[in-house]
Image: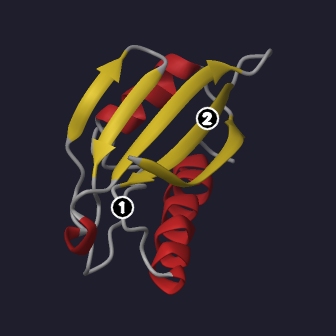
Amino acid sequence: MLEAGSRTRAQPPPPAVVFEALTEPDRDPARPWLRLLDDEQAPRILHAEHPHLVVWSSLWPRRADAQVRFDLAPDGGSGTRLCWSLLVAEPLPDPSLLGHLRKRLNELINANLRYAFGQ
């Protein structure tokens, strides 16, 4: 698998809380954050090591080979340093599709998930 993109940002809660949100995205119906588009599907958990690693299956049926890896670490305070990495098999998606996939992950994780935590 090739890394086709990644981004690291802080999330306000501690790693165990972020881990729970990533492994159970529908756990709190009052704070939905995994809002999928018509061409996306809910991910399956392929691998998880509490509280520092989660690997999702692809969100995109047209790139079923893709995986999303989340590395979680304490940020030195009470929050989490969360890094998502988009992993794909060769060949890489064309630049337009790759940009879309990276943008969607950034929206889901660094916008929707963050907003679900009140940030």
Q: Nearer the viewer, mark 1 or mark 2?
A: 1
Is 2 situated left or right of 82 in this image? Answer: left
> Residue beneath label 1, please?
90
Is 102 situated left or right of 61 in this image? Answer: right
Q: Is residue 13 above or below residue 41?
A: above
| Residue lying furthest bottom | 96
> Residue beneath label 2, please?
82
95 vs 23, nearest the viewer:
95
Q: Residue at x 56, y 76 (%)?
A: 99
> Crowdedness of circle 2 by 10 Å Cα count: few (<14), some, many (20+)?
many
> Crowdedness of circle 1 by 10 Å Cα count: few (<14), some, many (20+)?
few
**What's under tag 2, amino acid-wise?**
Leu
Q: Position of residue 43 (x, y in %)?
A: 24, 51
Q: Secondary structure at mark 2?
A: strand
Q: Residue at x 43, y 39 (%)?
A: 69
**What's under tag 1, amino acid-wise?**
Glu
Q: Residue at x 60, y 50 (%)?
A: 6
Is 37 situated left or right of 78 in this image? Answer: left
Q: Position of residue 107 (x, y in %)?
A: 56, 64
Q: Position of residue 54 (x, y in %)?
A: 38, 30
How far separated are the C-alphas under marks 1 and 2? 26 Å
Q: Secondary structure at mark 1?
A: loop
Disc number placed over residue 49 in the picture, else none: none
Q: Residue at x 54, y 44 (%)?
A: 84
Q: Is residue 115 above or below residue 92?
A: above
Of callouts 1 and 2, the N-terminal one? 2
Q: Quadrant of residue 75?
A: top right
Q: Position of residue 116 (x, y in %)?
A: 53, 48
Is 92 situated left or right of 3 in this image? Answer: left
Q: Quadrant of residue 41?
A: bottom left
Q: Is residue 117 above or below residue 32?
A: above
